[in-house]
Image (cartoon, rainbow, N blue to C red):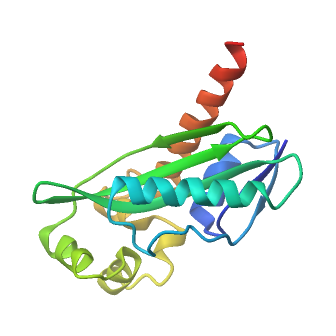
Amino acid sequence: MNIVVGSYNKAKVKAVQCMFPNANIMSADVDSGVNAQPKSDPETMQGAINRAKASKQIEDNCYGIGLEGGIMQIDDQVFLCNWGALVTPHDHLYIASGARIPLSVEIAQSLLNGQELGEIMREWTKINDIRQHQGAIGIFTDAHVSREDMFTHVVKLLAGQEKYHLNSK
């Protein structure tokens, strides 16, 4: 099985490796086609889909996986959100979303004013490559859930859907 992950981000690549330990996994820098800081579920989901579709074009007969983190708002509360997409060699598309947690008012306001979450977290924690490791979710869950864990859950949802589809034929 050949898989191309639409990012060099270590947390995203490790999430795919965790679910597919025997696969030949490559990563590629592909454009999400959305803002650097997606600010809604539809935008974050579209970023994941765009990454998956672009990744699939890199290698013949491969799976493309796109993983995208963003934020979304319900009433006055801003939440972390994350989406994933998997495109099979036969162009079947599967999508999934994962964990959400609310963000503090201060962080939410900075995000709504145009700052990226990675920048905010780097300033706040003094960890330069926080996106590559625990991420905001790791900080706000006291390391109970890392960014890799969050994306691993999404990749499991994607793989499970594809397996269900194959088994139901």
Q: How far from the left and from the top, in percent, is residue 100?
A: 31, 49
Q: Where 135 sits versus 126, above or below?
A: above
Image quarter where the C terminus lies is top right
Kindly identify the residue that appears in the image at 54 percent across and 35 percent down. Answer: 157
Q: Which quarter of the figure has residue 119?
A: bottom left
Kindly identify the residue that appears in the image at 44 percent across and 44 percent down. Answer: 97
Kindly identify the residue that appears in the image at 63 percent across and 40 percent down. Answer: 93
Q: How far from the left and from the top, in percent, is residue 10?
A: 62, 66
Q: Nearer the viewer, residue 115 or 45?
A: 45
Q: Residue furthest left?
A: 76
Q: Nearer the viewer, residue 53 or 106?
A: 53
Q: Where 30 sits versus 98, above or below?
A: below
Q: How far from the left and from the top, in percent, is residue 104?
A: 17, 66
Q: Residue furthest right?
A: 60
96 horizontally vs 65: left or right: left
Q: Which quarter of the figure has residue 122?
A: bottom left
Q: Which quarter of the figure has residue 23?
A: top right
In this orientation, does residue 126 appear? Answer: yes
73 horizontally vs 105: left or right: right
13 horizontally vs 80: left or right: right
Q: How far from the left and from the top, in percent, is residue 124?
A: 29, 82
In this orientation, does residue 146 appear? Answer: no
Q: Nearer the viewer, residue 146 or 104?
A: 104
Image quarter where the N terminus lies is top right
129 horizontally vs 43: left or right: right
